[in-house]
């Protein structure tokens, strides 16, 4: 709870605690003294009132005994009055004692005294009356009841003696009790004193320990921080030196960069010029491309026409083939008929043989016709094959033209893209030129800033050296403070 | 007036016979002209069950069911090529059709008698080949058709004819 308080607060709390304990001790001492005092007062009261009163009771009794003995001897009223006054004194004293005595046994004894006195008075009264009737006393034997009076008197005296003894014992016991309480109060005060001393010692020890620990730790931290600060300052100083040399190098590099930037700017200008010329050339190329595309389209049309003509040629060949088939069929039929005619003619004698010769000639003609038709068929097949080959070749050519056209389109678009890119390049080159000029200006500014930075770095180095000296001094002071606090050097 | 399909009155003597020359597979064959009725393109032919391999089947010639004999198979030298021509030939039992290759024409064929060449004309062929001659550089078999068709074929053809 106290850990978070300031040291001043702890000091105030320690002194406050000590002061409070001192106040408590003073108060308890006063109370103890008052207590002892009241006890002693009670003892004195008991001795003064009760014991002395009891003694006074004894004295009054002795006085009455003497007085009524005088009366019994003399028979004068003086003694009679005196004994009556003595009894009154005795009874008043009994009444007083009854009020002041607190001890129960003493009260019983007081009652016993009172009873014995009453009995004594009762026994004494007839004897006193008997003496009053006697005008002269010759012998004690004249007075009857003297022995009872004596016995009663002794009983009263004995009771009073017992009361006195009891009161003496009570006073002694109270005196002992009072002394015992006084000793207890003394022990209590000594205990409180010891407690106070212990608390004060504890507070002092705690404050001392806290002082050593907290201030010591703080100063230790200051010392280590000073050492770190010193090291950091040394590092900063060496870093400042390195930085200064690096800044010099940077300045040199920036100067070279400046020269390079200017060269780049010149190159960019030249590139821009070349790009513009290239763009002009690309624009001139567009017309040539359009002409070439028209030529390709014309070739495509021509190839299509060739394909159409070739297909027509194929169809015509097919038609010729149909006719040739018919001729071939007719020739074959003629051949069969001629053979059959020959067969028929062979069984018809001489005329038949002559007819057979004619039929044979017809058969030969039919054979030749069939052969020619066969040749024509072969030729037509050749023509159709050639037409097919030509059509296929033309188709391939048409496809090649298409492909070439597409390639040319791609080449054209590539060419246009190149022209666009050249234009973009020209723009980019102009931007580069501009940017390089701006860069040159910026580099010049950076050069100035670098020079300033180099100067600041040198100043920083100087201040770092100073900081190092200050930190060293602070470290020494911390050590001394630690010695003062008692923690010692770490 | 002789009927279609009947045999001629004068049989050939084996020399200088006017014959119809035709191809049958790889062979060159001739048939005496008086045995031939007519030539024609191959007609629709139906196969006959239970007949030898050289019988292609049966066809209808001029309204008459006629067995068709493959000459190439009959002579044992041919394959089953499609015939180019049918020859209607007279036999003792009526006309038969011979399936042949190309018909070369009418020739006067000089052929030796078959007796002198048992090595060439032995076996079944002796019933078929009347003689052997040449045409140019090729051998030429002069055929006789009368006994070419086995009886079972005629029976089958007759049965088919009745059935149709």
Image: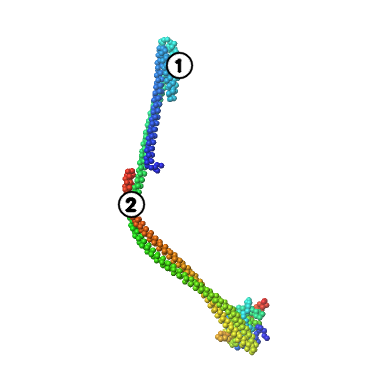
Residue B48 is tagged as none
Q: What SS does tag 2 mark?
A: helix
x%, y% of residue A361? 60, 86
User: Which residue lies under the disc numbered 1?
Assistant: A122
- Looking at this view, is A385 or B54 the one in front? A385
x%, y% of residue A392? 53, 75
**Chain assignment, label 2:** A
Q: Compared to A106, does A292 lie above or below?
A: below
**Chain assignment, label 1:** A
x%, y% of residue A343? 63, 85
Residue contact between numbered discs 2 and 1, judged by CB atoms under 8 Å:
no
Residue A325 as seen in the image, left or right of residue A485: right
Q: Residue at x 44, y 23 (%)?
A: A99
Colour setting: rainbow
User: Which residue lies under the disc numbered 2?
Assistant: A463
Residue A137 as seen in the image, left or right of residue A320: left
Mark 1 is surrounded, within 10 Å at the Cα level, by few (under 14), some (14 to 19) or many (20 or more) other residues, namely: few
Sequence-first tag of 2 and 1: 1
């Amino acid at each position: 709870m106290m850990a978070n308080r300031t040291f001043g607060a702890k000091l105030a709390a320690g002194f406050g605690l000590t002061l409070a304990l001192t106040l408590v001790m003073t108060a308890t001492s006063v109370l103890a003294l008052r207590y002892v005092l009241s006890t002693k007062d009670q003892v004195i009261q008991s001795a003064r009132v009760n014991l002395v009163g009891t003694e006074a009771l004894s004295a009054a009794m002795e006085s009455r005994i003497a007085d009524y003995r005088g009366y019994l001897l003399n028979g004068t009223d003086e003694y009679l009055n005196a004994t009556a006054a003595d009894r009154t004194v005795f009874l008043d004293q009994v009444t007083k004692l009854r009020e002041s005595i607190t001890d129960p046994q003493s009260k019983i004894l007081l009652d016993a005294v009172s009873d014995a006195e009453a009995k004594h008075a009762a026994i004494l009264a007839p004897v006193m009356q008997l003496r009053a009737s006697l005008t002269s006393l010759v012998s004690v034997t004249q007075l009857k009841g003297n022995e009872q009076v004596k016995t009663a008197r002794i009983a009263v005296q004995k009771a009073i003696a017992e009361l006195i003894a009891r009161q003496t014992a009570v006073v002694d016991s109270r005196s002992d009790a009072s002394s015992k309480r006084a000793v207890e109060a003394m022990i209590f005060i000594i205990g409180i004193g010891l407690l106070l001393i212990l608390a004060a010692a504890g507070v002092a020890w705690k404050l001392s320990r806290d002082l050593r620990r907290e201030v010591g730790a703080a100063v230790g931290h200051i010392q280590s921080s000073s050492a770190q600060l010193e090291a950091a300052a040394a590092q900063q100083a060496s870093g400042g030196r390195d930085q200064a040399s690096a800044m010099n190098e940077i300045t040199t590099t920036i100067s070279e960069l400046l020269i390079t930037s200017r060269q780049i700017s010149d190159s960019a200008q030249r590139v821009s010029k070349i790009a513009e010329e290239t763009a002009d050339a690309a624009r001139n190329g567009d017309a040539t491309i359009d002409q070439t595309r028209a030529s390709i389209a014309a070739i495509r049309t021509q190839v299509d026409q060739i394909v159409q003509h070739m297909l027509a040629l194929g169809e015509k060949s097919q038609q010729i083939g149909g006719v040739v088939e018919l001729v071939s069929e007719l020739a074959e039929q003629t051949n069969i008929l001629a053979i059959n005619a020959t067969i028929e003619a062979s069984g018809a004698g001489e005329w038949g043989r002559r007819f057979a010769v004619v039929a044979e000639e017809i058969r030969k003609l039919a054979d030749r016709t069939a052969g020619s038709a066969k040749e024509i068929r072969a030729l037509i097949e050749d023509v159709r094959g050639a037409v097919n080959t030509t059509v296929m070749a033309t188709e391939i050519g048409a496809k090649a033209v298409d492909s070439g056209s597409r390639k040319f389109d791609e080449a054209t678009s590539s060419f246009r893209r190149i022209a666009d890119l050249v234009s973009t390049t020209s723009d980019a080159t102009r931007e580069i030129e501009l940017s390089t000029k701006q860069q040159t200006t910026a580099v010049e500014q950076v050069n100035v800033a670098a020079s300033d930075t180099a100067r600041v770095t040198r100043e920083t180095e100087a201040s770092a050296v100073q900081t190092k000296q200050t930190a060293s001094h602070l470290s020494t002071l911390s050590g001394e403070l630690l010695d003062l606090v008692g923690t010692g050097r770490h | 007036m002789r009927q279609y399909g009947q045999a001629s009155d004068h049989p050939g003597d084996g020399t200088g016979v006017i014959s119809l020359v035709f191809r049958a597979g790889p062979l060159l064959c001739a048939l005496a002209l008086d045995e031939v009725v007519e030539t024609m393109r191959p007609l629709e032919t139906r196969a006959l069950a239970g007949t030898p391999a050289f019988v292609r089947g049966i066809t209808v010639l001029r309204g008459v069911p006629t067995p068709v004999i493959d000459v190439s198979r009959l002579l044992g030298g041919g394959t089953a090529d499609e015939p180019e021509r049918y020859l209607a030939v007279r036999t003792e039992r009526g006309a038969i059709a011979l399936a042949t290759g190309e018909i070369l024409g009418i020739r006067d064929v000089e052929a030796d008698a078959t007796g002198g060449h048992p090595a060439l004309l032995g076996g079944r062929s002796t019933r078929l080949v009347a003689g052997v001659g040449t045409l140019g550089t090729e051998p030429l078999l002069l055929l006789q058709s009368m006994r070419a068709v086995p009886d079972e074929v005629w029976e089958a053809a007759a049965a088919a004819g009745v059935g149709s």
